[in-house]
Every structure is written in C-alpha cells, then in structure tokens.
Image (cartoon, rainbow, N blue to C red):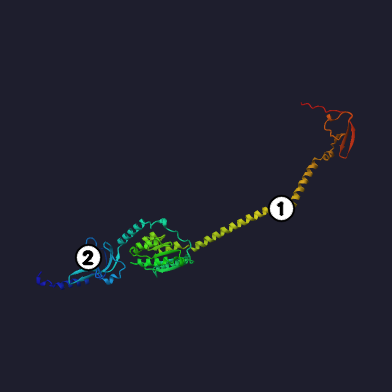
Amino acid sequence: MSVDRLPTYSVAELNTAIGSLLERGFAPRFLLEATVSRPQLRKGHLWLTLTDGSASIPGVVWASKLAQLSYQPKDGDGVTVVGKLNFWAARASLTVQALDIRPSLSTVLRDFERVRQLLEQEGLIDPSHQRPLPRQPASIAVLTSVPSSALADMLRTAAERWPMTQLIVVPIPVQGSVAPTIISTLEALAERTDELGLDALVLARGGGSREDLAVFDNEALCRLLANYPIPVVTGLGHEDDLTVADLVADHRAATPTAAIVALLPDREAERQGLAQRQSRLKDALLGRILRERQRLQDRDVDLQQQSPLEKIKRQRQALAQRHQLLKALSPERWLKRGLALISNTAGDPISDLESVKIGDQLNIRMSNGSLEARVDQIQPSAPTTSS
C-alpha cells in the first residue's frame, strides 16, 4: 500500500474521528453489570472504576445526577449501571457516564445477610418473640405506596372479608434510599397508636425485583419494626422474596393481599360459626328446659305424695288391707265353715284331750250360737303307723 494513499490525521482529528465512530456505532444507552472500585467524590462528582475482575473502565456520576440517585455505591458493591459512553477527544479518554446506579442482587443479598446475622445475635429475630395477631381488629394502619395496585387489592379484600375494621392508609415511598422517610413515618405513628386505636400495622409493597426490596433490609428500620408497640405484619414483594423486615415482623405474609387475609377474619366463615354456635346454644337451652320440666314434674309428684289427702288415702288403703287380713284370720270365718271353738268353764280354749277329763263342763261355740256339754267319754284317736 502506498503511503500517499493512507489517510492522514492530526491528533485532534484522529480523536474526533474516533469519537464520531463511537457515537455512530455504539448504543446511546446501555446496562452495565460491574463491581465498584475506589469511588471518590471530587467537586461534587462521583468518580469510580467499574470492573468485572478481568477488565475495567472509568465511570463518573455528575453532581446534578448524583443528587437524584436513590443509591450511592460503596467500594466493592456490585451494581447495575444505566450509562452511556463519554469520549473526550482532547485526550482520547473514554468514560462511562452513569445515568442511574442500582445495587446488584449480590450486593443486596450480602447486606441482607449482614443485617440478619447482626439482629439475630441481638435476639431481635426470634420466632418465640412474635406476638399473636388480633382476632377481630377494630383498626389497622396500612403503610404502602399510594396509589398502587397493592393498595387497591388490600382495600378490596378488606371490604370483602371484614368491613367492620377501619383501615388507616399511611402513604410511604417503597423504593430506593427511602429508609429515613419510612422510619420517621413509623416513629410518628408509634406515638399515636393509642390515640388512633390501632390494633396492628401492615407494611406492604407490591411486586418488583429483590433489589427493589433492599430498603426493607435497612438495619435501623428493622430495629424499629422489631420493637414496635403493636403487632406488625409484612407483605413485601412476591412469595419467594424474603427481607430482614419479614424476619423481625410478628407475621410474614407472602403478598400484600395475604397480609390483609392474615389479619382480618372471613365474615362468611364467622357467620357460619355464629349459626352453628346459635344452634348448639338453642339445643342446650331446649335440653335444659326439658330437664327442668321433668324435674318439676317429679317434684310435683313428690308433693302430691306428701299431701294430707294422699296420706289419708294411703292410710285408708292400709287399714282396708289390715281389715281384710283380720277378716281372713277371724274365728268367725272358720265357724261358718262348720268348725267350733271349745273352752272350759273358765273360758280357756281346749286344744287337745289332755286339757279335759270325764265330767268336765265344756262350752262349744258355733257360728250361730253356743251350747253347754259334759264330758262323758274320752276317746283318743288311734295312733298312725307307717307302712
């Protein structure tokens, strides 16, 4: 190739051409997964190195953008950067200008584990310390973003399940570096729990990535929830998401709607339960009435048996029976059957021959009178002999 055919540039022209090539050939916005190294604030701008362990590139967050970020990375943090390329032609310097920075999942999980271990060692994460939830709360506070689909679902579920409970909705931000705002709201609400008659608190956030839930791993926020004056129910993210706030709460629900379900009874189930209890009470009262009626009837019979007329009646019956018995045993009955009563002149009954002798005067009583007789002869009966 001839040297005369090669393009010729000045340094400024070359750098400008490189810059133009980058602007035309590279995406204006991109996502960059990296680890932050040596972040430094200089004149209000955040300078840092973005690396993946095998390569690195400088990065910068201009002061105007830094004030808008909800998260400021520390050395060693894994991050996801929304950026664009900045090329300074004067010195052929290439830098990633960060338009937004969010912690990566690894950073979020690392912070989660650090706070979890710390609070667990202090006894703030202990299932035995969880308080029971009120059975039929009169009033509960719901802390969530307003408006949101999560709030709409909670309000609808509460109206369907137990409309007698008052829901006091307290708006809070739920994403980014908003822990101080949530903490101040919780502290102000804690001072008014008695005034508002609150029985429980729901801390809720709808779906999102695990990184979006990082605020609920905040140490100060979780300490406050662990010592809150009323039971705390969390419904954060999806069923598979777990935050430190869930661990210190008195009850962790899989979703915001599930948090309302956990706190409020089902009015249909309660209605059925009341109907069953009413039926059992009715049966019990009816059984008692029947038992009392039978007892009164028994007492009435007893009283009747103890009445003077009844006593006279029984005594008359007894006298009649005795009269019948005396009549059955009366000598008159035997006399009418042809038997006679024999007695001596002294009136002593004669029952055998040894009681009389020849010449004795005897009285013989019969059914229709008596007669006098003298013993002229005594004739004993012949003795019986066995064959």
Q: Residue at x 52, y 61 (%)?
A: 272
Q: CA distance from mark 1 to mark 2?
A: 112 Å
Q: Residues within 10 Å of mark 1 (few under 14, many from 20)?
A: few
The reply to whether residue 242 is in sight is: no
Residue 242, given in percent of the width and then of the height, sits at 36, 60
Would you name the residue on which mark 2 appears? 57
Residue 248, given in percent of the width and then of the height, sits at 39, 59
Q: Which mark is residue 386?
A: none
Query: Which residue is more in the foreground, 196 or 212?
Result: 196
Residue type at mark 2 is Ile
Extreme residue toward the front, this view: 191
Q: Which mark is residue 304?
A: 1
Q: Nearer the viewer, mark 1 or mark 2?
A: 1
Q: Name the quarter where the C terminus is drawn.
A: top right
> Is 137 on the left-hand or right-hand side of 340?
left
Q: Residue 89: name its quadrant.
A: bottom left
Residue 178, given in percent of the width and then of the height, sits at 35, 67
Picture layout, residue 10 above or below residue 106: below
